Amino acid sequence: MAEEQTGTQANAEAGAGGEAEEKSDLRATLRTLASTLWFPAFFFTGFLVCYLLPFHNPTPHHVEVAVPGHAAVQIQEALDQKSPGAFDIVQVSDAGAARDAVTDRDATAGYVPDAGNPQLFVAKADGYSLESVLQKTFTAVAQQSGGHLHMHDVAPTAAGDGMGTGLFYLVLACTIPSYVMVMMLLRATTFGRRKKIITLAAAGAVISVVAYLVGLSMDVIPNKPLAILFLFLMTQAVAQTSYGLVPFCKQFFPGVAMGLFVLLSMPSSGGAIPVQMVPGFFRALHPIMPMGNLIEALRGLFYFDGTNVVRPVLVICCWVVVGAALLALGAWRERRALARESAGDEEEVPEPPVEDPTFELQQPSALPPHKHRIGQSEPMLTGCVADPQGQPLKGVAITVTGTHGRELVRAMTDGNGEYAATGLPESVVNVIASSPDRLAAVSRVLVRDGHPVRQDFQLEPRARRPVQAVSV
């Protein structure tokens, strides 16, 4: 009976252990799925909310139309009955004032309700789809009074931009690469912060000039070289702010940066769909986000004789300043963390940021010395292990650990006694060289991005114990 009870208890314990192991495996699976699928899930949701929602049925909202005379009140009432909230009629003195309201960007359109010759002043530069809606709406208004509508485009787009969206794609070509550059530079472990900032600025200058020249050659934009400066400011607003966000957002950085400069900026830019035809949330973002402000600045420069250019340019400059402030704050936090680590403070140093999951993740890893290919990460830690006579030692284990003992990477020396590793966090690490027949050696080194460090070792042989004679 005792044996049966013991067996039953053992089976119960085994079952409980198996159940606990299954729960542990399930939790590990869920954590893995959450860590790998959050970004595509974020993108999926973002495209539904930020693209399908504003673009599926664009309709006008509070489009300002300048109308001379007392007919403005009657037209407003008629439009409110047909399309409530779609148009806001602004009364002006005469037909000239209605036209000037459009060229001065005080109104989106101007309508002159002359019974014999009704006229509509529009600006195709504000968007072809908006022009089409205005034409359809006020053609019906003119027909009710027995007239035939005459349209006047007071701000036509460049000859190569028939749909009025070329400017949007030109700006987009400067926005996306500015974000991607940050992603790729995170892998440049031999570049420090200063070099990366300079690289972002230099690449932004090249992108701006090339984009302008290509747009000019395709007749998408007029010849206004000041646009190069506006494009450059945009590249820096995106690139420097994205880079500045890295230490603060860590593994969520891709979602934050893409959310700001792609998911929210593009629908609110007014480039593909005029801002007057998207939902209120995106219209509210239009005067804040850098892409929308750049499009407004370029439209004013190219098609409205510089009207309303200063404010959007200042907003873009504010984004550049925000990026610089984030970079300065991140550098200060890093110096403080490294100082605590060097002083032996037990407070945990922040983990290195996680890169964009659309690229290969940069993690601590060993590298073959002197065999780096283009596109492969450069070593952050290198060294050579030799014996007291200076002869290289092959097969020595190199273990790099954090100050709290967590193993970061393990490498082996090659035939020349050399080793290399990359992807290490910016902090003080322990480097341990060990071999079965040698005394181990340990060294603490400071690893910093952009400052490759070398740590050599000289391993002494283990003292052999004398063999004692055994008497028979």
Image: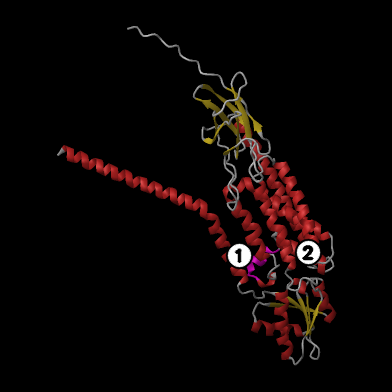
Magenta segment range?
278-286
Q: Residues within 10 Å of mark 1 (few under 14, many from 20)?
A: many
Residue 281 falls inside the magenta stretch = yes
Q: Nearer the viewer, residue 383 or 260?
A: 383
Q: Secondary structure at mark 2?
A: helix
Residue at 63% x, 44% y: name it: 376
Q: Quadrant of the N terminus?
A: top left
Please tell me whether residue 384 is drawn above or below residue 225 in the rendered image.
above
Disc ID at residue 100? none
Residue 7 position within the rendered picture, expressed as x and y whole percent measured from the top left: 21, 40
Q: Quadrant of residue 339?
A: top right
The residue type indicated by label 2 comes to Gly
Q: Which mark is residue 50?
A: 1
Asked which colour scheme the image uses, the reply is secondary structure
Q: Quadrant of the C terminus?
A: top left
Vertical comparison of 471 with 55: above or below: above
Marks 2, 1: nearer the viewer: 2
**Who is closer to the viewer here, 457 or 2?**
457
- On screen, residue 440 versus residue 231, left or right, reads left
| Residue furthest to the left | 1
Calculate the distance from the C-alpha at mark 2 to the C-alpha at mark 1. 27 Å
